Image (cartoon, rainbow, N blue to C red):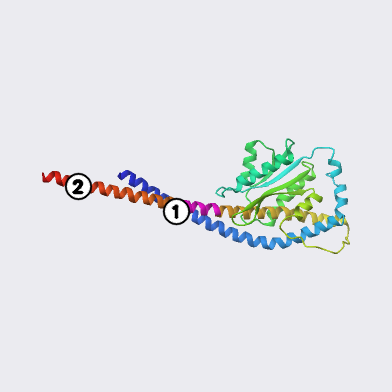
Amino acid sequence: MGASLNDVKHRITSTKKTRQITNAMEMVSQAKLNQIQKHTVSYAEYASQIKSVVLHLAQSHILDGLNKSSGHSADKDQSKTKRSAYLIITSDRGMVGSYNSNVIREANEFIEKHSGSNDYQILAVGGTGSDFYKKRGDNVSYEYRGVSDVPTFNEVRQIVKMVTSMYDKGQFDELYVCYEHFVNRLISRFRAEKMLPIDDEAIASAASQDIEVKPMSAEYDVEPSEKEVLDVVLPQYSESLVYGAILDAKTSEHASSSTAMKSASDNADDLISSLELQYNRARQAAITTEITEITGGQEALSH
């Protein structure tokens, strides 16, 4: 009985230490979540403006000439199977609840539905997704690890430059960004947005998202030329899409981590209560046994 009491006591001590760790991790995740949400608010205004500009450029048919002159025009690609690429955003760490498994499962379903048996390639942002698709034998043509807890715009520029370079070289014909969209601290939803080429489908996909696209009634008078204007606007548009997706995904990651750590702390509390009850019962039983043995010994001596 003594060994059993020691084992239970050791488990109680160990569980309390674990609860301290999960409580601390929950507080850290909450702090990161609050911080990134402040960044998201300021980013939303910029994203709304840049999406409004591109949407109205499309409505003004200024993008038509770009799509026709591109080596990835829709007319050219209709006769052949499109080579798709998927930029999948996951985390670099564990202990984020079901965040990684959800985005990978949903992304796999989207890829299966969209590409089927056709060739495709994975562009992974986050070590978890990269490791998963490499282990599965998929073509991971690009990976980026170590995204900051609160991502900066400069980080995203590196990703966008590499992705657009691969697209311009003809390594793929279309690109989708797959990630978990933050709804609230308990809910996130999978999204797959078309990023390249910047055509009607991609613009409609961006315009349908939660960020409000402000209406513009003015007509465009382009100076010095349409090409020079688009050379500035479209890279900013691509950067805003990827940055917004990574910011959104990181927000979901922190929320999922906070929820997972809170659940772990609650489970630890329940386990501690159960173990303490078990310990007290075992201790009481041991005391009762000792009293019985002492009483029995005294009776034997008296005879």
Whether residue 170 is situated above or below residue 148 in the rendered picture: above
Q: Is residue 267 magenta?
A: yes
Q: Secondary structure at mark 2?
A: helix
What amino acid type should be assigned to the residue bearing mark 2? Ile
Q: Is residue 81 left or right of residue 286?
A: right
**Nearer to me, 51 or 239:** 51
Q: Which residue is mark 1?
A: 269
**Quadrant housing the C terminus:** top left
Distance from Cα at disc 1 to Cα at disc 2: 37 Å
The label number, if any, that marks residue 294 in the structure image: 2
First-in-chain label (1 vs 2): 1
x, y percent for residue 49? 76, 61
Q: Is residue 120 left or right of residue 1?
A: right
Residue at image point 84% right, 40% down: 78
Q: Pointer 1 and pointer 2: residues touching (CB < 8 Å)?
A: no
What amino acid type should be assigned to the residue bearing mark 1? Asp
**Nearer to me, 41 or 285:** 285
Residue at image point 32% right, 47% down: 282
Q: Secondary structure at mark 1?
A: helix
Q: How many marks?
A: 2
- Label 2 Cα neighbours within 10 Å, binned few <14 / some 14-19 / many ≥20: few
x, y percent for residue 177? 71, 48
Whether residue 134 is situated above or below residue 68 in the rendered picture: above
x, y percent for residue 39? 65, 61
Residue at image point 80% right, 45% down: 168
The main secondary structure of the magenta stretch is helix
The extreme left residue here reads 303
Is residue 198 at all visible to an observer of this figure?
no
x, y percent for residue 181? 66, 53
Q: Is residue 222 left or right of residue 168?
A: right
**Over which residues does the magenta segment extend?**
259-268
Q: Is residue 262 magenta?
A: yes
